[in-house]
Amino acid sequence: MAFLQAVSVIEVPFFSSFWTKLCQQLKISRDLSTAYHPETDGKTERVNQILKQYLWMYFSYHRDDWNTWLPLAEFAYNNSDHSSTKQLPFFTVYGRDPHFDSVHITKDTPSGKLSTKIQSVQQDVKRELEVVINLFKRYADKSRASPPAFNPGDMVWLSSKNIKSTRPTKKLSDRWLGTFPILKKVSTHAYHLKLLSQWKSIHQVFHISLLEPVKTSTIPNRHQEPPPPIIIEEEEEWEVSQILDSKLKRRKLWYLVEWKGFSQDSEIST
């Protein structure tokens, strides 16, 4: 059975002539995983998140002897239908339904007590697994949206989320950098930008979630209103463009700043 999708980090061998022809012959779709965005491999990442949350909830119920009942948690997951394959994970891998091995117990454990405990744990893990899967499904349905489409030559803003700044604190750094032109579309969710020449150490391919389209007015000489305040910790704050000066007053350091989006006449101290 041929794979329909292959996920890889952005590496030269993945674009080689050999891999290109091989993927074309096997009808494999190549998806690229960009830095700081592991969600590209959505299936694997979603399963990992579900398992982490599922095991966390399971451990919270069985703190003292969780390792004894861990096979039950594994069995419950592998014995549950998956919406993507419409099969049990165990059946998908081995081609048959799973067979549950006995839990390791001591010889003096009463059979009735063990049977009651197993039934209780099975109900717990089944309920917890259903809760976690429903939570992730609701979150995915709520956050899923069609990404904007960019073309080569379009100008975009680049998020500074994963880029180090020379500013003393991250709070003083610009939230968006640019603007930068798009050189080419690498995949459905990754674009190659033309960055500044001094940014040689920064990889020039970014996930679409880190990009924002540049919105320009079609009316000549139209006055651009100052940007709205940013809500930080339930308080209105404006983004600082640059620090112009500072002074010590009453044992406190005061800054003269230029607010981004405002004219120099709007400079105030803070």
Image (spheres, rainbow, N blue to C red):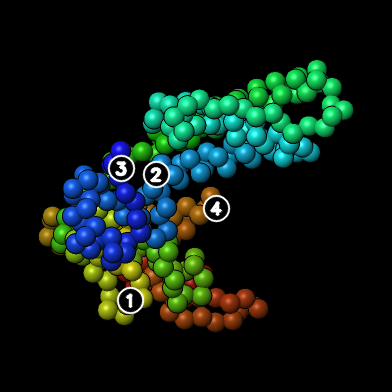
Name the secondary structure under disc 4. Answer: loop
Query: What amino acid type should be assigned to the residue bearing mark 3?
Result: Phe
Residue 122 shown left or right of residue 231 in the figure? right
User: What is the C-alpha distance between the residues marked 1 and 3?
Assistant: 37 Å
Q: Earlier in the sequence, mark 3 or mark 2?
A: 3
Task: Check whether the beta carbons of the residues at disc 2 and disc 4 lie within 8 A of each other.
Answer: no
Q: Which residue is mark 1?
A: 199
Q: Residue at x 65, y 29 (%)?
A: 101
Closest to the camera, between mark 3 and mark 2, is: 3
Give yes or no for contact between labels 1 and 3 (Cβ–Cβ under 8 Å).
no
- Dot 1 crowding, Cα within 10 Å, few <14, some 14–19, many 20+: few
Q: Residues within 10 Å of mark 3 (few under 14, many from 20)?
A: few
Q: Where's the N terminus, which quadrant?
A: top left
User: Measuring 53% from the left and 50% from the top, which residue is drawn there?
Assistant: 234
Q: Which three-letter amino acid code belongs to the residue tagged 2?
A: Gly
In this view, the mark in front (2 or 4) = 2
Which residue ends up furthest to the top in the rendered image?
112
Identify the residue position indicated by label 3 in the image: 3
Q: Which residue is mark 2?
A: 42
Q: Which mark is residue 233?
A: 4
Q: Residue at x 47, y 81 (%)?
A: 245
Q: Which numbered disc, 4 or 3, marks the residue closer to the eye?
A: 3
Mark 3: secondary structure: loop
The answer to whether marks 1 and 2 mark residues whose Cβ atoms lie closer than 8 Å is: no
